Amino acid sequence: MLAKLFVKCQQCGTTHFYSFFKHAYFVCSRCGHHFRLDAPTWLKQLCDRGSFQELDGNLKSLDPLGFPKYESKLAQATQQTGANEAVMTGVGEIDGYPAAMAVMEPNFIMASMGSVVGEKITRLLEYAALNKLPVLMVISSGGARMQEGILSLMQMAKTAAAIRRLHESRMPLITVLTDPTTGGVTASFAMLGDISIAEAGALIGFAGPRVIQQTIGQKLPEGFQRAEFLLEHGMLDIVVPRKNLKKTIVTILKIHRSRPYTRRPQYFN
């Protein structure tokens, strides 16, 4: 019962009433720490009520390499989250604007990208290109799923190719990078958005800062690989507090809908 009444900030230790914390978009009022959200919570915050329709929800990972204990990890993750995989894809409306959406589930093996995650994202991108829908991705991931080896790494090229087809259809990809966005996901679809948004303080990078520091034997700059650092160095378009995120996305969708499509850019010929 106490777990439903109070929640403690992992960063500063402040205790919040859960009901107030929920209305504050799960952001600590003292230090601004953004708590990780599961996929259903993201959809509730972003989508118009009842508008989201899931696609390919029946797809599940197998164990192609016979990796030790992988099947049990998948079963445990499904039991804990109620999801079949580390990403939910579908179509919905955001303040009346239709969009194709992919929302990653950080509680499913840290939203790592295996064959099914890559397949679901690719199918969504192709569906959006065919049906002339903008795409919104809410990303949180520990990277490629090691239990699937090279099959996981292949999803990097696969999703990138699908984004190219989306671009050719003149539909935008909006990416929202949350904490953490790392590894093969960062090195593929996460950084290929037409507009890249990040949450405040989000860790975004390929290898983690501790790995880099140990490898190069040098102290890293303050705030290295955090969203604000990446924005300062031109890797992001904007860092948005969670309470303003939906309004920002709606503005982008509104601008996109108002664009004329009189001619194709020369580089698409």
Image (cartoon, rainbow, N blue to C red):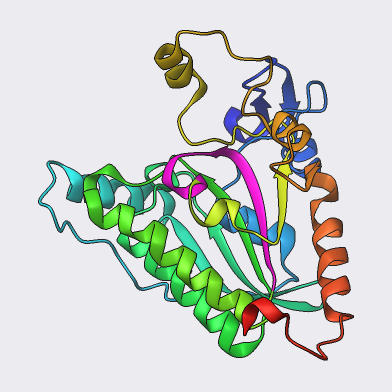
* Residue 26 x/y as whole percent: 72, 39
Residue 187 locus on image (x, y percent): 48, 47
Q: Which residues are magenta?
A: 172-186
* Residue 101 to residue 45: above or below: below
- Which residue is rendered at x = 40% and y = 61% of the image? 157
Q: In which image quadrant can residue 179 be found?
A: top right
Up-down relation of residue 21 to residue 247 (above or below)? above
- Let me know if residue 175 is in the magenta part: yes
Q: In the depicted view, which residue is nearer to us: 228 or 81?
A: 228
* Residue 229: image location, x then y, percent: 72, 29
Overall secondary structure of the magenta section: strand
Query: Residue at position x 45%, y 76% from top?
Result: 123
Q: Nearer the viewer, residue 170 or 253?
A: 170
Rendered residue at 65%/19% (across/down): 11
Residue 222 shown left or right of residue 180 in the figure: right
Q: Nearer the viewer, residue 96 or 143?
A: 143
Q: Residue at x 70, y 71 (%)?
A: 172
Can you say which quadrant of the picture contains the N terminus?
Answer: top right
Position of the C terminus by quadrant: bottom right
Compared to residue 250, the image places residue 74 above or below, namely above
- Residue 84 seen in the figure: no
Q: Position of residue 78 (x, y in %)?
A: 34, 54
Q: Is residue 55 left or right of residue 252?
A: left
Q: Quadrant of residue 202?
A: top right
